[in-house]
Image: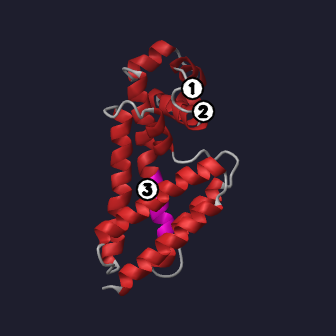
Amino acid sequence: MKPSDIPTRERIVNAASKLFYSAGIRAVSVDAVAEKASLTKRTLYYHFASKDELIAAYLDGRDQPNLALYQRWFAEAQGGPAEKVMALFGNLAKAARQPKWKGCGFLRTAAELADMPGHPAIKTGIAHKKRVEGWLHDVLAEAGAAAPETLSRQIVLLLDGAFAVVLLNRDASYMETAGEAASTLVKAALSAR
């Protein structure tokens, strides 16, 4: 498919996604996004009223694919719920070992917008993290884990903490260590039923 065959709005979001993830939202100008999408800034603003709206669209575009990836990793993993949860962290550790890995786009964007809690991208990030937590809750409740609300929240804390520490230290083994902790929590919750 030629770039001109892709709908303009999708081309803009694709260009923004590549640039925002690799360089950060504040470092990337609207001009750079328009240039990467091979269109004018005026055309970009026809589709997005502001850069803030474009940033929210960038994160919205990551939401379902990220959740679907977690769900696939979980489904493909061998073993019970504890091993499947640990496999999520193991797959994230593999991803973190890739040179282009820059951490969690939602958390990086939230850090850049920390002084703007009402920003549309912050709301998108919150909704994504809640969807991940809700999915974990559902699979753990279905498995019979005790206190799935607390357990899913603990796993999300381990995930996001691991994202931060791995990004800071550039050592993916922290993700694996967080996975071991999550597995231990799941085993304890399953034995408490």
Residue that label 3 marks = 67
Q: Position of residue 140 (x, y in %)?
A: 35, 73
Q: What is the magenta segment's predominant secondary structure?
A: helix
Residue type marked 3: Leu
- Residues 4 and 158: in front is 158
What residue would you read off at disc 1?
27
Image position, residue 18 (x, y; %): 58, 36
Residue 136 visible from this viewpoint = no
Location of residue 38 by image quarter: top right
Q: Which residue is drawn at 34% across and 31% down?
A: 119
Residue 64: give x, y in percent of width and height.
41, 50
User: Marks 1 and 2: CB-CB under 8 Å?
Assistant: yes
Magenta region: 66-76
Q: Residues within 10 Å of mark 2 (few under 14, many from 20)?
A: few
Q: Can residue 132 be seen in this view?
A: yes
Relative placement, left or right, of 150 versus 171 is left
